[in-house]
Amino acid sequence: MNDIGSNHHHRLWMYERMVKSRHFEDLIKPAYLEGKKPLFNMAKGPIPGEMHLSDGQEPCAVGVCAHLRPTDTVTATHRPHHVAIAKGVDLDAMAAEIFGKADGLSGGRGGHMHLFDPAVNFCCSGIIAQGLGPAVGAAMAARLRGRDDVAVAFLGDGAANQGAFHEALNLAAIWKAPVVFVIEDNRYGISVPKAECTAVARNADRAASYGMPGTHVPGNDPDLVHAAAGEAIARARRGEGPSLIEIETTRLEGHFMGDAEGYRPPGEVARLREQDPIPAYRRRLLADGFEAGELDGLEAAAKGAVEAAFAHARAGVLPEPEQAFLQVFVERAV
């Protein structure tokens, strides 16, 4: 577990990681748009391709990852930065990977939707629901090794309608795998409202179909997420099987950068920004007796680390073109 044994320390840890994640996204926005104006072309600029920001979903990541060790496995989605940062992925190498640099996590080959850091057992994928099966596999591997490590699979509410979701929950339940499934319910599957594509109001209710606990966490609240995740992860470590957690959260940005968001009702984004979880959590911490100076210091250090990572990424070199086909296929002796 992270060195945040007391209630005081784990709450400061969560706040620091949320600030770090948000500042990371704040620096991505202008960098991503470089070279893409006046006519938006996602192939241009220092960060080509799609970009999915996690602004507003930070409580989901920190409340869960506060309970995890480097040896625990986390699989995340195409919107992965907040989870990667909460899990402890190397910030310099992560930024370099997003910029496609040679010293990135995967040598610049993966980009922002395919971040892999074996040092902390983190991975993500641009394929919807792809990480659920590997999370179950990682959980079973830990059991076979005689360890009490767990796996956590993050997914969106849209992914709960994929076949892989039901297959993974079914196998996890049969095998009593030490895995926790975490649904980040931001109420949209890309541009489709949850109510128009999901037959149940709460995906947590689906857990009962597989004989596992299902917990619904309202309010995008880091403390409530932390409490729910603590119970589920402890249960998995004890060998009592999988759990499902559904977290109400908010996507403050579009599905991807450049999304015109015409599907949003008028005023929705402004209303959600008024509920931004980071300033709300700072206000709660101050009300609970935390010192403003302590929070200011954490914010400054977090932002400094992010800025140093981006400076490192921009200064890095691109991989040589002749390396494009390396590490793509595994050669076998005939």
Image (cartoon, rainbow, N blue to C red):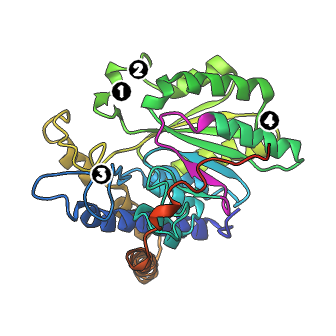
Read off the residue under disc 2: 198
In terms of sequence position, does the residue under pointer 1 or pointer 3 come before the other?
Answer: 1
Per the model, the C-alpha gap separating discs 2 and 3 is 25 Å
Q: Residues within 10 Å of mark 1 (few under 14, many from 20)?
A: some
Mark 2 neighbour density, 10 Å: few (under 14) some (14–19) many (20 or more)? some
Nearer-the-camera pick, 47 or 288? 47
Residue 6 horizontal side relative to residue 297, left or right? right
- Tell me the element at label 4: loop
Q: Residues within 10 Å of mark 3 (few under 14, many from 20)?
A: some
Residue type indicated by callout 4: Glu
Which of labels 4 and 2 is toward the front?
2
Q: CA distance from mark 4 to mark 2?
A: 29 Å
Instruction: Answer whether residue 128 is magenta in the image.
Output: yes
Amino acid type, label 1: Lys
Q: x, y percentage for residue 325?
A: 54, 54
Q: Which residue is mark 1?
A: 194
Label 1: which secondary element:
helix
Residue named by callout 4: 240
Asked if the residue at tag 1 contacts the one at tag 4, i.e. Cβ–Cβ closer than 8 Å, the answer is no
* Callout 1 touching callout 3 (CB < 8 Å): no
Amino acid type for the residue under numbered disc 3: Gln
